[in-house]
Image (cartoon, rainbow, N blue to C red):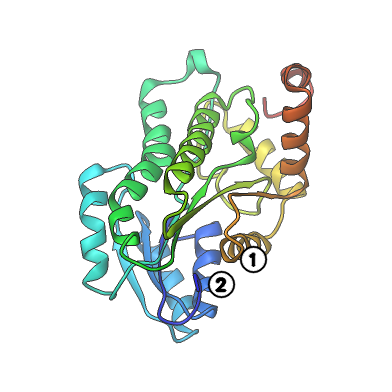
Amino acid sequence: MLLGPDRVAIITGAASGIGRALSLHLARKGCDLALVDVNQSGLNETASIVALTGRQASLHLVDVSNMSQMQSLPETVLRSHSAIHLLVNNAGVSLASPFESGSLEDMHWIVGINLWGVIYGCKFFLPYLRREAAAHIVNISSDFGLIGFPTKTLYCTSKFGIRGFSEALRAELYGSSVGLTCVYPGAVNTELIRNGRTWDTKKRESEARFVASRSMSIDKVADKILKAIERKRARVLIGRDSYAIDLMARLFPVLTNNIVSRLQQRLPFL
């Protein structure tokens, strides 16, 4: 059984959004939690919500892009919990900027959190997951891990990277006690865009409103992810946008890229 009483789940990016929703849903399933984020107040809020379920939650103020902090995290978690059964690499940030005018600092920032955070999580937690009869990894990518989008060059780079990394690692784990699910959410009702970095704040606000108008609730997203874990699915698309993008990119890759390129003249946030 992957989810249930006495199972321990590590969730990065647990202070808000999908991470917080997953924490609550997992606690309701009976799991104890190790909550990871750089936002202390957000972690405290998530922990207070989890406490209402009666489950144990340890808090870990960790930057997922910091190798030394991530390397020491498993042993820190084990000081509060007896084992590690589920790793959810959810922490992520947003960056919008034309590639040529974007700063290298911002590029290192987003790849460090979105991609290296996933790599560090898997690298340092995998030996502990292998100790269990049944364990699982969840890596959160994006529908922008299925298609390239203008002004999202580095965001897409990080999410495509998670996709390729997850597919290769899952193949390596085949036949072992550790499963892996890669998740591709479409528009979700979180503050990811508003909290992200951008070259134009007005365009960021336009994008945030556009996404909010098409978004799925975080509770529905969390529910779909938990069902995918229980069914040991390799990949899960969430939202109509993700299904449409995936289908178009697979059947008509060049045409889809051309269509997306032309959207620069039509969408106010590009």
Residue ID at (57%, 27%): 152
Q: Earlier in the sequence, mark 2 or mark 1?
A: 2
Q: Answer above or below: position of 43 versus 98.
A: below
Percent x, y for residue 166? 48, 42
Residue density around tag 1, few if under 14, some if 14–19, many if 20 or more, within 10 Å: some
Percent x, y for residue 77? 27, 66
Q: Answer above or below: position of 181 versus 60.
A: above
Residue 117 numbered mark, or none: none
Residue 223 numbered mark, or none: 1
Report the front residue among 13 and 253.
253
Label 2: which secondary element: helix
Q: Amino acid at mark 1?
A: Asp
Report the front residue among 170 and 60.
170
Q: Residue furthest bottom?
A: 54
**Residue hosting label 2:** 25
Label 1: which secondary element: helix
Residue ID at (71%, 55%): 216
Residue density around tag 2, few if under 14, some if 14–19, many if 20 or more, within 10 Å: some
Q: Residue furthest top?
A: 100
Percent x, y for residue 160? 54, 32
Report the front residue among 67 and 16.
67
Report the quarter where the C terminus lies. top right
Q: Answer above or below: position of 195 versus 40.
A: above
Left or right for 169, reference 182? left
Q: CA distance from mark 2 to mark 1?
A: 7 Å
Pointer 2 and pointer 1: residues touching (CB < 8 Å)?
Answer: yes
Percent x, y for residue 114? 44, 40
Q: Amino acid at mark 2?
A: His
Report the front residue among 244 and 261.
244
Residue ID at (35%, 60%): 129
